[in-house]
Image (spheres, coloured by chain):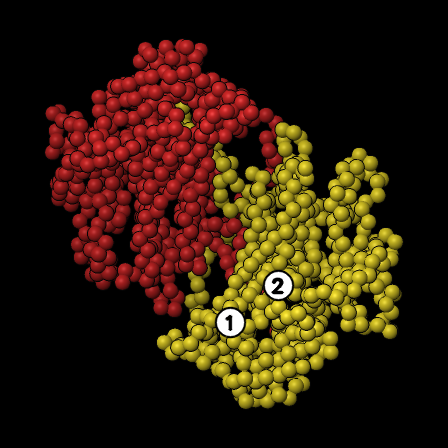
Chain colours: A yellow, B red
Amino acid sequence: MAHSSKIFCCFSFLFSTLSIIPLSHQLEQHPLDSLTPNEFIRVQAIVNQSHPTTTNDITFQYIGLNEPDKQALISWLQNHRTTPITAPPPRQAFVIARINHQTHELVVDLLYDNIVSDHIHHGFGYPLLTFEEQNGASQLVFNHAPFLAALNKRGLKVAEVICETFAIGWFGETKQNGRVVKVMCYYLDGTVNLYMRPIEAITVTVDLEAMKITHFRDRLVVPVPKAAGTDYRESEQKEPFGPELKGITVVQPDGPSFIIDGSRVRWANWDFHLSFDARVGPIVSLASIYDTEKQEFRRVMYRGFVSELFVPYMDLTEEWYYRTFFDAGEYGYGLCAVPLEPLRDCPANAVYMGAYVAAQNGMPIEMPNVFCIFERNAGDVMWRHTETMIPPDLITEVRPDMSLVVRMVSTVGNYDYINDWEFKQIGSIKVTVGLTGLLEVRGSKYTHKDQIDEEVYGTLLAENTLGAYHDHFITYHLDLDVDGCE
Amino acid sequence: MAHSSKIFCCFSFLFSTLSIIPLSHQLEQHPLDSLTPNEFIRVQAIVNQSHPTTTNDITFQYIGLNEPDKQALISWLQNHRTTPITAPPPRQAFVIARINHQTHELVVDLLYDNIVSDHIHHGFGYPLLTFEEQNGASQLVFNHAPFLAALNKRGLKVAEVICETFAIGWFGETKQNGRVVKVMCYYLDGTVNLYMRPIEAITVTVDLEAMKITHFRDRLVVPVPKAAGTDYRESEQKEPFGPELKGITVVQPDGPSFIIDGSRVRWANWDFHLSFDARVGPIVSLASIYDTEKQEFRRVMYRGFVSELFVPYMDLTEEWYYRTFFDAGEYGYGLCAVPLEPLRDCPANAVYMGAYVAAQNGMPIEMPNVFCIFERNAGDVMWRHTETMIPPDLITEVRPDMSLVVRMVSTVGNYDYINDWEFKQIGSIKVTVGLTGLLEVRGSKYTHKDQIDEEVYGTLLAENTLGAYHDHFITYHLDLDVDGCE
């Protein structure tokens, strides 16, 4: 599931951000580096200049690096080693903007400060949802009399209601009905675990362009599952709350063995480039491993990232059938990244990095602690052998395993995706996405499974609480270049 | 692959052992505890007394606990809580001994010091091989003139030859040919990596009962792969040997969070019994997890262990076709356990435990550092959620993952099996067997893959070195009792 009005937190980041943009601080830029805050501002200015905001309605749905041509980049990297004055491939931004209710795909050149191309998209599909428009849509219900009446009918307090926006999927219609979302609400009132308290059977449809409710239906009253026992905060748990373990920590008295040089990370026999994108989150590029015999780096992967997270639900009821979320393409796997909690999301030896995304107005928003990088010492063995056959002694050779982990956590509504890129000295890259957070549940009249005599598309987990059947399909873009392209 | 003359190390353990057997030290014994050194000695004495060694030829192929009846044990455990004076199930040893060239299966009672049953096995299959008989068999070749001639023909020095014994499998013969092994030799001469230097095309068949070579064939001369580049010892590597990483360690200033009470281990919400067996290695019993709501332990698994490791090779040549090893049933997954190397096989916070097995004469042999137990802090997250929807702040709850690992390493010839039982606070038990060590290779006339015009049942890995196709099938005995037997 996915959605969010994370604008609550993003706005507070926004203000702190603008003051710390290091305009004068320019390390040598790598052609694959994410856009800098300064570049975001320039992109915004260039697009606004070409379509003046006094006469145009502009929203920035996506701003990111326009990835340079692979062959051009590789040639440049090879020449750059011997001739550092060679010009890099063009530095460009790719922009998806809604301009007067049309989707523009723009390429902006950051050397010449001009628009290279401006294409209006007429095909299927819509750009990423911004936090601002999601927040706008989910607030509309609070001024919509039928919705307030529906709450009243259920005996619910308006102040305890939280609403979210849901992408509506696509079911083979030849005609698209414009940018539309549905709004679904939850009830707090004694818990912060809103996902366990859905207010079911109300359908609210919002046209994002008009920012208006175009359809409303209150189909039936279903009990809201109770708050008791749903709060997950440690402070709210009764004693005993699980076992108390004694302290355990990782210590590196001489510091970490990795070097972060701008976006380039070097560790053990590995060298790679790490960048961040609002849509796909972490991008690992040019991952190479040092060959001690050849005394050179050998490329393993040109570029890798999570390209999509597709989360279809299998519930055919009126308020659920459309839930077929693209967590990257609709909500932004990077956009939904959350600040990592030191010592909890990552161990004591982790180093943290931030990133930037564009707000709806095109201005940069800082995402602090969006990455952590740490050496994992899990107590495993990389390789070992004990030779018992050669007298008089045992020969025991053991190489402990150590790896480097790059982590991002993206919270797309109820789900927290823990996205790891792990680099192993044996030459492999291990990709992992841990799925945690909270289940998306459907409110139900049933309080015991024996009462159920129809298809409910889920499992009764607690009174009035159905865990809805669903899948998570995580796809990766992996451009492997083991020993190069040929 | 599997075999060994680990008797080299075992004999040295034997002498150190007998002096430290703590005869007077008797913790309350659990009915599932492995046999104590004192019990091994009593078993040996009881069996020898019933079949006096002056008139009988006796070898002990296996001595271990005769597992008590499950229902009797569970009843006793339940009653024992309230009535600690209840008598436990009978304490018995199970013995497989060769007595005058017949296989006896004996049950020895350790309360009454008598033999409860003595059954002669006439069916298929043979007992575990002892180290002593494997060592005896593999030494025979050095007094066998045709073998010495074969070495001479190849220009190999006798002092650099190491031989091992190989179980011969079973190919559906209705008549068994007695306890027979084949002996296969390797060449050191500049390396300790004997597995990379097989002396091919010589077949030596040994009758273990007569301890005589019954068949010898030198089929053809195949080059022994060269020693250069095969030694794996760090001390033998040229600079640069991989990347140097800075120190990293795990620190638990207040000590570990687990308690080892005899064979019972308690950690976090887990409680289990750990024992050791010559055939199967680690046995985890009565694994239970504490339910904080019910305030009681709930059983998850009655008993779990690796029951067999079957390693068939797919090479049909005369010297290879029979290689279909049962690494547990023929060589002993426990018997082949090796001492764990502190700080390398297990992290700094590990605690080590030893175990005992019986030598061929029935006397106990100490296996030091055969288990390590440690808390794994791999930097992972057990559960997390960031709630972005409830203003004004983010709610972030993260529970770092911590688990308990019980490790044994068993080196069956060329392969090192890293056997982990990992207990997770979420209630799952993760079983892992890591396969490392060295590949079993076949010597070959080929030096380049383009020369190969026949089926070679493997891949040319280096000059004269074929990596043989093979599988590893690891089977577990898992008697899960989630919430009990009913």
Residue type at mark 1: give it: Asp
Q: What amino acid does circle 2 point to?
A: Asp
Q: Vertically, is A266 above or below B59?
A: below
Residue at left offset 36%, top offset 76%: A450
* Left or right of residue B457, residue A294 in this image: right
Residue B72 location in percent, x, y?
20, 55
Vertical order, A94 against A222 (above or below): above
Seen in the picture, residue A473 relative to B157 is either above or below; the reply is: below
- Which residue is pictured at 47% across the width and 22% down the height? B444
Residues indicated by labels 2 and 1 sit on the same polypeptide chain: yes
Q: CA distance from mark 2 to mark 1?
A: 18 Å
Across and down, in percent, residue A360 comes to: 75, 68
Task: From the top left corner, tell me how far across and down residue A57 is, in percent.
Answer: 81, 73
**Camera sees residue B241:** yes
Which is nearer the eye, B149 or B43? B149
For the point 68% across and 49% down, which residue is it? A274
Taking depth in this image into account, of B219 and B257 the one nearest to the observer is B219
What subunit carries mark 1? A
Residue wearing tag 2 = A327
Which corner quadrant of the image does residue A258 belong to? top right
Q: Chain of mark 2?
A: A
- Helix or strand or loop: what does disc 1 sit on? loop
> Which label was assigned to residue A315?
1
Q: Position of residue B212 (x, y in %)?
A: 25, 19
Q: Secondary structure at mark 2?
A: helix
Task: For label 1, count other residues whose C-alpha is less than 10 Å away and answer few (under 14), some (14-19) or many (20+).
Answer: some
Whether tag 2 and tag 1 are in contact, CB under 8 A, the answer is no
For the residue carrying disc 2, how many other residues have a C-alpha within 10 Å: few (<14), some (14-19), or many (20+)? many
Query: Disc 2 or 1, which lies upstream in sequence?
Result: 1
